Amino acid sequence: MSRAWVAEAVRRVEADANRSADTHLHVFPLPPSWGIDLYLKDESVHPTGSLKHRLARSLFLYGLCNGWISSGTTVVDASSGSTAVSEAYFARLLGLPFIAVMPAATSVEKISLIAFYGGEVHLVDDPASVYEEARALAESVGGHYLDQFTYAERATDWRGNNNIAESILSQMSREPHPVPAWVVVGAGTGGTSATIGRYLRYQQLPTQLCVVDPEGSAFYESWVSGSSAVTACGSRIEGIGRPRVEPSFVPGVVDRMLQVPDAASIAAMRWCSSVTGRLVGASTGTSLWGALQLVAAMRAAGEQGSVVTLICDGGERYAHTYYSDAWLEAQGIDPAPYVADLEALLSS
């Protein structure tokens, strides 16, 4: 392996990070009389449009510095879409071939973005088969399987180095309640919750971590039962929820989990877009629904403070699914009752 090529590759990845300003922290409009502030960390402004840009950068650096990726290496990963978009971007940055193994139901917008960045897409009918398909494909071409579901929790420096947790706490420093009562995130690989949970403990902060999980996913039941052997059908909310408990999920750093119906996720997604004017995806809706449950509980207990959650990606990637009434009807999803609940919460 050429150390000179690896050094240049690391420089390019780090230069990309240096060119990208930190992501924005938006205030979500809640009645001032509540004394509770809700913030949305907007990860959709990364160059590839999602929270997964951070993960893809870390996975490439991890592979480069471990000697797994070199000049000409074909890079392969299993993904539900957004991670693969970001990985295709970094593969193009380094001049490497990239293949994404994804469920056939992945949104066409994400598939198009992967192709835009020069990546190839290998679709499978069974979402649970993406892992072995990706591993076998990487072996067959002599490439490297990035394996985000195993390496997400260890590829990111959870002690700082401008990780998402450090960024949130830094941006909160001048707010009325600078130390959040809660940070709310979804479980996809488990990497984001592991990074934030570890950082909160490392900094000796009282902030609690809540992980939201969509229906059909294995994480919630696993956390409640204490068994990592739980399996499920998967999730209709792209980017979060898995048919198995991923190796990167670290349950010990999670203070609370909430299970969110798909209709509630989509209701909160659409409602968030109408309230804020920012088009967001369904995983953002899942997190926002969970955050608002915690806000309601704080109000009921007479507590004041702040809650932070994420805009995981932009809603333009879901024009043919979550923002399509015809698609929702075909899926048997009716968000209307949950939208009414959200509107009642703000007006109460």
Image (cartoon, rainbow, N blue to C red):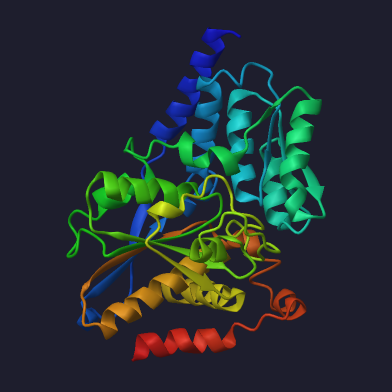
- In the image: residue 101, left or right of residue 271: right
Decide which of 232, 312 is in the foreground and name it: 232
Tell me the residue at 26%/61% (across/down). 180
The percent position of residue 201, horizontal first and vertical second, equals 28, 48
The percent position of residue 40, horizontal first and vertical second, equals 38, 62
Q: How many marks?
A: 0
Tell me the residue at 37%/40% (across/down). 158
Q: Is residue 40 visible?
A: yes
70 up-or-down from 176: above or below:
above
Examine the image and state in which quarter residue 283 appears. Answer: bottom right
Examine the image and state in which quarter residue 74 appears. Answer: top right
Quadrant the N terminus occupies: top right
162 up-or-down from 105: above or below:
above
The percent position of residue 107, horizontal first and vertical second, equals 71, 58
Decide which of 196, 118 is in the foreground and name it: 196
Q: Is residue 120 visible?
A: no
Quadrant the C terminus occupies: bottom left
The percent position of residue 346, horizontal first and vertical second, equals 36, 85
- In the image: residue 214, left or right of residue 251: right
74 up-or-down from 206: above or below:
above
Tell me the residue at 68%/21% (across/down). 73
Decide which of 252, 279 is in the foreground and name it: 252
Tell me the residue at 70%/77% (across/down). 328
- In the image: residue 191, left or right of residue 197: right
- In the image: residue 253, left or right of residue 145: left
